[in-house]
Image (spheres, helix red, strand yellow):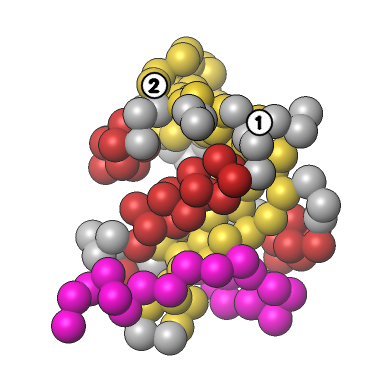
């Protein structure tokens, strides 16, 4: 069976938040968002949470915010370590780009640790370009953020 056929991407609901929060803590430790932040995004009208399931278990998520009506910012994305390199983050990125295009979004943006080369490579696959740097944006360890964006072409 192909790995990709085991991946299911959909919008998260409140019942998914506890699993999503566990992934956040596993992936980001002391820099993890609070469970309340995830509930806010899940209920919000200005964004949402995309969840990834692998073998019917939530294993990843992508949090986004809609800015000004025609731009999306990817605020948080994570995949459980044991589920990485299976195309899960790629599937979530494909989903957000397709959803954005259907919704009339013109641009997708994000920040990424400058040392996170696998993530940067994934974002470049979606034609995201480096727009700038935010000095000392991340803590533990202190690190710059690379600003990236892509225009949605119809």
- Residue 23: x and y in percent read 50, 68
Left or right, 39 with respect to 137, comes to right
- Badge 1 marks a residue whose secondary structure is strand
- Residue 144: x and y in percent read 45, 24
User: Magenta segment: does it hold 25?
Assistant: no
Whether residue 92 is situated above or below residue 133 in the rendered picture? below
Give the residue at x 65% y 44%. 103
Q: What's the distance in space between the residues labelled 2 and 1, CA to CA?
A: 15 Å
Left or right, 44 with respect to 70, comes to right
- Neighbours of disc 1 within 10 Å: few (<14), some (14-19), many (20+): some
- Residue 96: x and y in percent read 52, 49
Which residue has dot 1 on it? 71
Extent of the magenta region = 1-23
Left or right, 44 with respect to 150, comes to right
Whether residue 57 is situated above or below residue 89 in the rendered picture? below
- Badge 2 marks a residue whose secondary structure is strand
Which residue, as the protein is rendered here, is positioned at the far top? 132
- Residue 153: x and y in percent read 48, 28
Picture disc at residue 84: none
- Neighbours of disc 2 within 10 Å: few (<14), some (14-19), many (20+): some
Give the residue at x 77% y 28%. 68
Picture disc at residue 129: 2
In the foreground, 12 or 34 = 12
Q: Are marks 2 and 1 in contact (CB under 8 Å)?
A: no
Q: Is residue 89 visible?
A: no
Whether residue 129 is situated above or below residue 124 in the rendered picture? above
User: Magenta segment: does it hold 2?
Assistant: yes
Give the residue at x 65% y 37%. 104
Disc with the residue nearer the chain's start (2 vs 1): 1
Figure quadrant of residue 115: top left
In the foreground, 92 or 145 = 92
């Amino acid at each position: 069976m192909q790995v990709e056929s085991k991946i299911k991407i959909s919008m998260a609901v409140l019942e998914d938040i506890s699993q999503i929060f566990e992934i956040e803590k596993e992936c980001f430790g002391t820099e993890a968002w609070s469970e309340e932040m995830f509930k806010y995004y899940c209920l919000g009208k200005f964004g949402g949470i995309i969840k990834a399931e692998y073998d019917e278990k939530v294993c990843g998520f992508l949090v986004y915010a809609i800015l000004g009506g025609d731009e999306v910012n990817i605020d948080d994305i994570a995949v459980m370590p044991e589920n990485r390199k299976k195309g899960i983050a790629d599937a979530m990125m494909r989903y957000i780009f397709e959803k954005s295009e259907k919704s009339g979004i013109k641009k997708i943006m994000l920040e990424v640790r400058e040392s996170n080369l696998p993530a940067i490579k994934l974002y470049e696959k979606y034609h995201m370009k480096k727009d700038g740097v935010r000095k000392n944006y991340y803590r533990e360890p202190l690190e710059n953020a690379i600003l990236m964006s892509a225009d949605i072409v119809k």
